[in-house]
Image: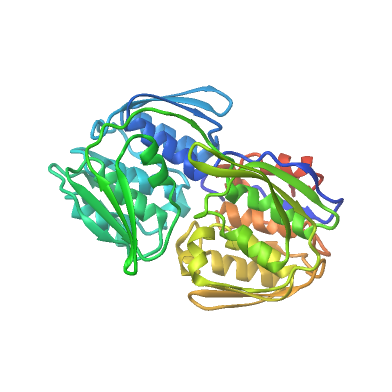
Amino acid sequence: MSGHGPAKPMTSRKGDALKGVANVPGDKSVSHRSLIFGAMTVGETKIEGLLEGQDVLDTAKAMRAFGAEVERTGEGQWRVHGVGVGGFAEPEDVIDCGNSGTGVRLIMGAMATSPIAATFTGDASLRSRPMGRITDPISLFGARSFGRAEGRLPLTIIGAQNPGPVEYRSPVPSAQVKSAVLLAGLNAPGITTLIEAEATRDHTERMLKGFGAKVETEVTPDGRYIHLTGQPELTPIDITVPRDPSSAAFPVCAALIAEGSDVLVPNISLNPTRAGLYTTLQEMGADLTFENEREEGGEPVADLRAKFSPDMKGIEVPPERAASMIDEFPVLSVVAASATGATKMLGVKELRVKESDRIDAMARGLEDMGVTVEETEDTFTVHGMGAGGVPGGGIAEARLDHRIAMSFLVLGFSTQKPVSVDDGSPIDTSFPIFEPLMQELGASVARSNS
């Protein structure tokens, strides 16, 4: 069972070449932040192209609970009338963030320096994930938290009465931790500094600047120092959400391994802190081209064309690249299975604390499809079987994880026998149009019991 209803077994199989245009949803990271930052402005923020998956809808609902006016005005079109920095009202009920680790962690940071209390919960997957990486730094501002062992949900946060600025060195490469600290710092006087050993997604810094906050980044041999000046008045802006590179990864990777395919994904974000997968695929020999490169809303975007690439080779993916492709390792594993030789992914231990232990989930699923893998705590190696060489025929456990489910369905487009996943329902949380979009390109993917 998923956290959102009955299980939905799904099956994919080899079929015709994938052809056409894949209009993937808006970027999930930018969508979450658009709603949260809009709620912290004074005035009205207009959003175009918002991802309307369940994760983001849960964040919209949460912002209403904290007192902001959040309204859907059309398909992908939303308006948020904010309450200002430090203006959150105390929610009357528990905040249910569903499956979204990004949503709950950013919201915790945003409310941590307001003198209010809020209780957070989520689905079974989210309740199993550690929140100590957020509650530890926000406690430095004066916030208190009370939850289950290891800070797991349900968890109550009592915001700081008199927050002060902090300097915090993140122990893990996590954009969620960085964003939570910066959001908490918005309502603390003075300068809050977040230090990270390696670059992570910088949507928060880019968007805060767009809303009028003073954010400065200093790169030193000791790490990246991000300085935020607290208590700004954030100014509403109009936001056009670029298409999600993490969602684009699925039709792109499907095209690379499905014989004869040629797929165009327009207007995807090429933010350098998110583009590690595409760099890796090109190094493997993938036929990828970037067309019409431009900038929209402070984010670099382009149209990406992917073609069947039967001559891809296994490579070693360096650990410093992990943060820029942390969500894409599952689908990269699928491509690696269809390449020639071994692909060794380094620095991937963060995958063990995502929606599921993604390394274990992919390892067990790939083995069930006839692929040889090796794993350690921080590495994952897939021994490729060449184009069309993966036997398939197994049933992968999605483990309430949307990316695991979609990755195995992508694998099925090139395997000798069909590939099934036990539950595709979590896909609705991040990529609700995955099934019809892939079918429109010509893919054979459907509910197993249909």
Q: Nearer the viewer, residue 46 or 126?
A: 46
Name the residue: 48% across, 41% down.
30
Q: Nearer the viewer, residue 90 or 234?
A: 234
Q: Residue furthest left?
A: 162
Total number of numbered discs in the rendering: 0
Q: Quadrant of residue 243?
A: top right
Residue 332 appears at what percent x and percent y? 64, 63
Q: Nearer the viewer, residue 362 or 237?
A: 237
Q: Is residue 380 left or right of residue 156?
A: right
Residue 414 appears at what percent x and percent y? 80, 60
Q: Can the viewer see residue 145?
A: no
Residue 189 appears at what percent x and percent y? 17, 43
Looking at the image, residue 289 lies above or below residue 41: below
Name the residue: 26% across, 31% down.
233
Looking at the image, residue 418 lies above or below residue 40: below
Q: Can the viewer see residue 130?
A: yes
Q: Nearer the viewer, residue 193 or 98?
A: 193
Q: Is residue 421 left or right of residue 164?
A: right
Looking at the image, residue 288 lies above or below residue 33: below
Q: Is residue 194 left or right of residue 275?
A: left
Name the residue: 56% across, 60% down.
276
Colouring: rainbow
Looking at the image, residue 408 lies above or below residue 346: above
Residue 244 appears at what percent x and percent y? 58, 45
Quadrant (top left, top right, bottom left, bottom right) of the C terminus:
top right
Q: Is residue 76 left or right of residue 227?
A: right
Q: Quadrant of residue 41?
A: top left
Name the residue: 53% across, 54% down.
274
